[in-house]
Image (cartoon, rainbow, N blue to C red):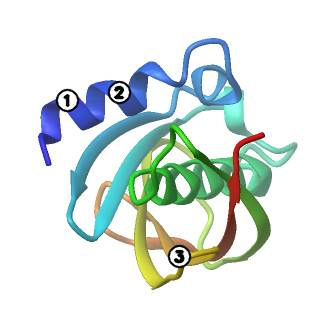
């Protein structure tokens, strides 16, 4: 896997999407993980001035769905998230959070990912599980 080319491809998919709006950037990829970062500032706050759980969920689904896409032939297959569960452990007011997706199960038709959302000090902010379905393109 060409890490630089893969990261450029993943980041190129963000144009004109929610990922661009939230300033999500893919920063690392390996044989069994994908990592993206998102800044924490007023653009992702909920009314109490802390990171909105929906923004956290968007980061988790982004990194987990893109991770699945790396393991399928995207010329003939499409990946869609079908279930996301997330537990918020700690609040975050500013800085950066990272979503790190690691596989629990990579089957032919479903993938299950664990996504840890951590801050720049490696504090666990949220823990997520994402189930993706792999479908034939029509």
Residue annotated with mark 2: 9
Q: How far apart are marks 1 and 3 (CA)?
A: 23 Å
Say which label, 1 or 3, has the lower sequence index: 1
Residue 56 image position (x, y, % from top left): 65, 54
Residue 9 image position (x, y, % from top left): 35, 27
Mark 2 in CB contact with mark 1 (< 8 angstroms): yes
Mark 3 in CB contact with mark 2 (< 8 angstroms): no
Residue annotated with mark 3: 113
**Relative to 123, 92 lies left or right:** right
Res 88 → quadrant: bottom right
State the quadrant of the C terminus. Answer: top right
Viewer-nearest of discs 1 and 3: 1
Q: How far apart are marks 3 and 2 (CA)?
A: 21 Å
Residue 101 image position (x, y, % from top left): 43, 66
Res 40 → quadrant: top right
The residue shown at (82%, 48%) is 48
Foreground pick, 92 / 138: 138
């Amino acid at each position: 896997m060409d890490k630089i080319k893969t990261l450029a491809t993943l980041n190129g998919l963000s144009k004109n999407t929610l990922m661009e709006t939230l300033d999500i950037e893919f920063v690392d990829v390996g044989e069994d993980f994908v990592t993206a970062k998102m800044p924490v500032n007023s653009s992702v706050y909920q009314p109490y001035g802390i990171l909105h759980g929906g923004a956290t969920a968007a980061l988790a689904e982004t990194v987990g769905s893109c991770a699945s896409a790396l393991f399928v032939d995207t010329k003939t297959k499409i990946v869609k998230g079908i279930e996301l569960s997330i537990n918020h452990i700690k609040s975050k007011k500013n800085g950066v959070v990272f979503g790190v997706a690691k596989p629990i199960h990579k089957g032919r038709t479903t993938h299950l990912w664990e996504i840890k959302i951590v801050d720049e000090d490696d504090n666990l902010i949220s823990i997520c599980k994402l189930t993706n379905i792999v479908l034939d393109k029509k």
